[in-house]
Every structure is written in structure tokens, then in C-alpha cells.
Image (cartoon, rainbow, N blue to C red):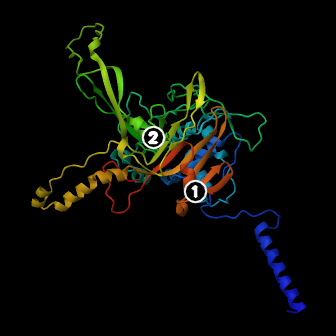
Amino acid sequence: MDSGDRILVAAGLTAAVVVGAFVLWGPGGAPKVRKRRGQIAGLQNLGRTCFLNTLLQALAACPTFIEWLKKYAKADGHNSMITTLYTVIEVVNGTHESARGTPVCPLGVLQALRAAGWVVPADQQDAHELLHVLLSCIEEETNSMSKKPGCLSDALGLGGSRAWSALASPASPPAAPHPLRADSTPPTPSALSIRPASAAPADEPDLIEPEPMMEPPRLTKGVSRSLCHLSSVGRRWVTPAVARPPPAPPFRGTLASRLQCTVCSHKSPIRYDKFDSISLSMANASISVNGAYSLAGLLRAFTAPEMVKGVRCSKCCPDPAPLAAPAPAAPAPAPASAYTKHIRTVSFGKLPYCLCLHIGRVEWLGGALNKRGEFVAFPETLNMAPYSAVQQPKQVDLLSLVGEGRLRAGLSVLSAEGGAAGGEAAALYRLSAAVLHVGGPRSGHFATYRRGNGFEAKRWWYTSDTLVHEVSLQEVLRCSAYMLFYERVRPEPGMTASANSHHF
């Protein structure tokens, strides 16, 4: 190769380097952000907002919840919490048209909370508390969307949005008046609450100030919720005169409980209580042979029968029959023998599409707050059938159906009701995200392990504000989880569906 050819080769290489640098860095000298559909983006910390960022990443890993938001966002059309949350999640997942892979600013979610009447100060916040606040706002918006002016189609039941028919699910049983060991719609208090850090660098973890462990207050109209300094100011709770009940959110499930008298074995009617998440305690959970806790052990402790004292048995001491004209006299006190010990059993009556399990790690110990750091083993695939009230299949007399020429119809009924395998298939869940808290009871930081979306659902990512990097499933299963997000496994074509399952 002569000198002329060498000069041409060198010039060609130089031109290629220049063009590549221009494509990579751009004319401004800064590296271009490469857009890739489905690329997970981080979230900017607006000042002690890791509790918000970690929750958004966890929700963004729940496809059923996203699909539910999408249908309401299309029917909404204005800048509500549903529309804002759906847009932010789409940008985080890289599925929005404006997604560029750069860290996303979650300010819109905070503004939507303020617009809904919630005051979110810069201190003492918790990811589990925020989950219930968001779900409460979303439920209010779906209720208001179902409110329509009265018309003939409403009276005849002919009108309505297609979204209701597409999302309709069987009506949930009525809520129980007595409390159960679960989080209802009002949030459960947590001692992990964020407070502002004085002159803290931007890259330091958010600091946390604990709150006393006490009974959670009921969410009431116009009452400031001082427990975690999350207040709802000037909120209006309106019951529409003509409205269709909106379908339950994907996180909504019901617990079934029953009391049984230890003297006469009388069983009370089943009571139902709604929940959006379940708080599990390590206090009464058993430890495995290797000295560690497990999620299955916490669930067994949650659904284990417990003794309740001082309950009046309606069979041991029935109420007297009312007279035609009862005398205005004070009712006689029930005898002491009427109050007996009862055994209370709790099970999952209706399993949600998205299951959130909160592991309570903060407790009072010796007059001081203590955070439990024990490892709780949890699986990627969770079977909730052992803790659920799975309905038994109906007994169908196939011989009689053969004689009447209805064998095919009988098999269809049997398949629709399902068997043991069908019930377990409807109770299978797959892990979507795991939220962890690093630090003690008074300081720390929230982060999230989450699944990818779409075709990358088998890949796992660690997200901590703007930091996003891929990890292995083994690393996820080794983390000390604070909240676990599971999503019901959708049955394969041809799989039998039990009566406990619901088509989304």
C-alpha cells in the first residue's frame, strides 16, 4: 500500500469517527439519549419523595392495573389523578410517545393529589400510606364518573359507557361492620415516615421520622388526618342519585370471617370486609427450620383461627321475642353466661387481580421503636388457595344428563364451576415488584425491584430514584422486602376457571 492509499484510508477512518461522534454526541457536544420502546426510566427526587418514586415504579410493573387505568383515562378526558397517573406510568415504562429514557418528573402526581384536596407535606410520608391515598383518589374519581344525569336510558338500564360493561365484575359482598386483621380503604399507619433533612445533599437517602403505632383513623369527610400529616381538606363525598357502581379496582379484595361459639358450636353469618392491601405481622408467625421467616408462614399466621373472649352468643342467649306493645323500659342486661368464648376464622373471600402484601417491620420494644430486619423468604409464584375460601364444584349427575340428552351442557356446567385444579389456578400469583426500605426506624430510603414490561417481563430491574439497572431474579428474592406486589396469573387457553375467578 503506497502513501496515497494510506492517506485515503486514514481520511476515511477520520470521517467515520467524526460522523459517529456526531450521531452519538450531537451538535451540542452532549450525548444523545437513545430512545428504546419499553426502556424503564428513573424518577426525579423532588426532595424527600423516594416514597412516591418507589410506589410509581411498583405500580408500573402491574399490567392489569395499567390496563384498568387506561380504560378510565380514555373515558375521563381531563387532567385527573387517573389520567395523570396513567401518563406518568406510561412514560416510566417507555411506552408513551414522549418517552425518551431520561428521568421522569413525578410532579404531576403531587399536583393531582393537591387538586383532589390532599395536602402532602414534605415530611413524614410512607409508601404504604401513599398507596391507599392514591387508591382512595382513584376510587372517588371512578365514583364521580359513574354519576350521570337521570334519563330514560338510565331508568331502563339501556345506556351507559362501554367501559362499565367491559370492566364489570361480580358485586362484592357487603363490608363487615367489625374490624378484621387487614387494611381497609383507610390507610394503615406506619412508623416509616419521611421528614425533611436539614442541608442534606441531593444524593443522600431521605430521612424518616416515626409515628406512634396506634389504631388507624377512619377516612372521614373534611377531617384532617394527622396520623401521618396527610390531610384531606374540603373534600366532598357525594352519593349520586342515579349511578352505576363502578367495577372494583384491581387491588380490591374481600376477607371472609366467621365466629363460632365454643359452648354450643353455633356459627355466626359470614362477614365480609374489603381490603386494598394486607398487612402481615411477624409477631405470631412461626420460624422455619433454618431460622428464617417465610411469606407462607406470615399468611398462615394471618388466617390462623384465634380465640375471642366476651362475645354474646345468639343461640346460648337468644333475644326475647318483641311484644305487640313493648313497655318503655330499659332492656335487661344479658347474663354472664351469654358471653362466651368464640373462635374466629379469617380467609380470603375474593382475591384481587393485584395483591399487595405489606410486611410490618416496625414495632415498640422496651418503650422504643424498633425496626425488624429479619429476612422473610417470598416466592416468585404464590399460591393463595390454602388461605382462600375456594368454592367447591357443584355435583352434577352425568348419568341423568345422558338420559336427557344434555351431557354436553352438563360438561359445560362442570367446566365452568371448576375443580380443585381450577380453584388453584385462579389463586396463582406472580411477583411483579418488591419495595424495600434501607435504614433504621428513624432514617432510611425506599427503593424498588420491579419487572420489565411487555416482552421484557422476564427481566428484573433495581430502581432507586434516577438510578435504574438490571438485576437477577435471585437478587430480588434475597431482598428484605417491605411491600410485595403480586399479580394474578392469567389462565392459559383451555385452562379450567373456577367460580372464584373473574374475567377482567
The residue tagged 2 is 288
Q: Residues within 10 Å of mark 1 (few under 14, many from 20)?
A: few
Does residue 163 show up? yes
Q: Amino acid at mark 2?
A: Ser
Which of these two is toward me, 224 or 496?
496
Which mark is drawn over residue 472?
Answer: 1
Q: Is residue 221 left or right of residue 343?
A: right
Does residue 242 show up? no
Q: Is residue 390 left or right of residue 32?
A: left
Q: Is residue 13 above or below residue 316?
A: below
Q: Is residue 424 above or below residue 438?
A: below
Measure how far apart labels 2 and 1 are at the Cα level. 25 Å
Q: Position of residue 257 (x, y in %)?
A: 34, 33
| Residue lying furthest right | 3
Q: Position of residue 388 (x, y in %)?
A: 35, 42
Q: Is residue 64 left or right of residue 385?
A: right
Nearer the observer: mark 2 or 1; the answer is: 2
Q: Residue at x 70, y 41 (%)?
A: 205
Q: Position of residue 223 (x, y in %)?
A: 56, 26
